[in-house]
Amino acid sequence: MKRRKHPDSKPLRILKRKDISSYKHEIAEQQDYRCSLCGSDLACLPNKKIHLDHDHKTGMVRGTLCAGCNRAEGKIKNTISRFLSNIGIEFEQYVANMVKYWKENEDNPSCVLHPDHKTCHDKRTKNLRKSKERRDAKKTNKASTS
């Protein structure tokens, strides 16, 4: 591994591609083999599903994440950052505001349902109806071709 100086004058390790797997497990062990975001057990995942997460601006390794959280974190940060660059708020502040907003509204709901909201029961009923319509259409097609 090459060494360079970190901007804060700490020694900087430059990881070689061949060392990624062993370093990933070293970091995962420090995290008790838990994904830093969702807490899932990394020990039961195949190696390719454990990701060595890094900051794309600085290249600095942050920790290990499960594959799903690694994808989600990247998409969320990239999508929101593009949007935020137009309105002048930092990503971290936006996310903190979002979590606070969700929490406040979870603790004090308005008791007014949005007209587009569908309950789990509504969605299931709709899916069952569509399935029945497809089955009926297949039966009709078979009967007309016979």
Image (cartoon, grey):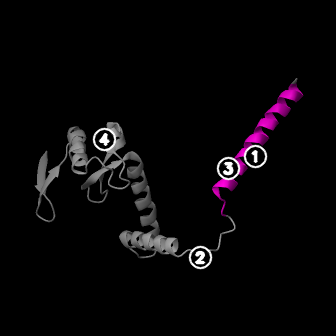
Q: Is residue 57 left or right of residue 127?
A: left
- Magenta stretch: includes residue 141: yes
Which residue type does callout 1 highlight?
Answer: Arg
Query: Does the residue at mark 1 contact the one at mark 3 (Cβ under 8 Å)?
Result: no
Q: Quadrant of the C terminus?
A: top right
How much space separates mark 1 and mark 3, taking CA atoms? 9 Å
- Spatial CA span between label 2 and label 3: 26 Å
**Callout 4, which amino acid?**
Ala
Query: How far across and how far down the image is residue 52, in percent?
Result: 29, 48
Image x and y of residue 139, in percent: 82, 32
Q: CA distance from mark 1 to mark 4?
A: 42 Å
Q: Which residue is mark 4?
A: 43
Separation of marks 2 and 4 at Cα, in angstroms: 42 Å
The residue beneath circle 1 is: 129
Q: Main secondary structure of the magenta part?
A: helix
Please give the range of residues in magenta.
Answer: 117-145
CA gap, disc 4 and disc 3:
35 Å
Q: Earlier in the sequence, mark 2 or mark 3?
A: 2
Question: What residue sits 13% from the left and 47% below the top?
Answer: 2
